[in-house]
Image (cartoon, grey):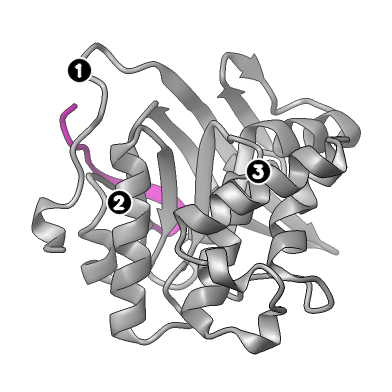
Amino acid sequence: MNPSISVVHSNTDAPVEVIRLQGVSKVYRMESVEVRALTHITWSVRQGDFWAIMGASGSGKSTLLNLVGLLDRPSEGSYTLNGMNVADLDDDAMSQQRLLRLGFIFQSFNLIPQLSVQENIELPLFYRGWEAATCARRACELAEKVGLADRLRHRPAELSGGQCQRVAIARALANEPAVLLADEPTGNLDSRTGTQIMDLLVEMNQEGRTIIMVTHESDIAAYASCRLHLRDGRIERLEQGHP
């Protein structure tokens, strides 16, 4: 697939806003030293968007993804996810919203090596209390969607890097998240396999899935319809596609 024609928004009506950050800053305090990782970030994401977050090392990309993914909380400002202000939730409520609303794809896959492909995909559903038969059925559907229907009993060590990332994508989709978050999803893959993974993400975006991806590679960012450039913890510029 040619990244230059990467994504078309699936919604023809005005898209629903799923994420809004308003005046968000993040400050880390270590003994007497204060490190400002993000400063006054105001940004919104619409349903069906495909965003790439870009910037040099230390620009705040991972910090921003962690805040959006409810793995951390802002020092200042508000964060609205699906209409709910989540910036001030306690840890338990934040974990619950993370489980219900968000799906994660990591550069290092973060699969559990002792579990099979099917069991890794089922994991978010297990934490939500789904019945075993329903979990199994959903895992089989998703494995087929990402091209791994014949690998359900395999463990991560028996898979290629690309196959492991496909398992991670299926797991991220298991709970039907409002937003799919990808942190350097092709970083550990060769270029051919990386292209296959990006084509899969584009396909999911064209089906209406909202995706936010961190990458430092311009050719990978080209698959996204919208790009946010960070510099020294501030938004340097936004390149926003049209629905």
Neighbours of disc 2 within 10 Å: few (<14), some (14-19), many (20+): many
Q: Which residues are magenta?
A: 228-243
- Which amino acid, mark 1? Thr
Q: Residues within 10 Å of mark 3 (few under 14, many from 20)?
A: some
Q: What secondary structure is found at the residue carrying circle 2?
A: helix
- The numbered mark, 1 or 3, whose residue comes first in the sequence reads 1
Q: Position of residue 214 (x, y in %)?
A: 44, 59
Give the camera-side residue of 125 and 93: 125
Q: CA distance from mark 1 to mark 3?
A: 29 Å
- Work out whether 105 lies above or below 138: below
Marks 2/1: CA distance?
A: 17 Å
Query: Where does label 1 land, which residue?
Result: 12
Give the side of residue 50 with respect to residue 99, left or right.
left
Dot 3 and dot 2 residues touching (CB under 8 Å): no
* Residue at horizontal 50 percent and vertical 69 percent from the top: 58
The quarter of the rendered structure image containing the C terminus is top left
Picture quarter with the N terminus: bottom left
Task: Check disc 3 and report its element: helix, strand or loop.
Answer: helix
Q: Residue at label 3?
A: 138
Which of disc 1 and disc 2 is earlier in sequence? Answer: 1
Q: Which residue is mark 2?
A: 202
The image position of residue 181, as x and y in percent, is 52, 49
**Magenta region includes residue 234:** yes
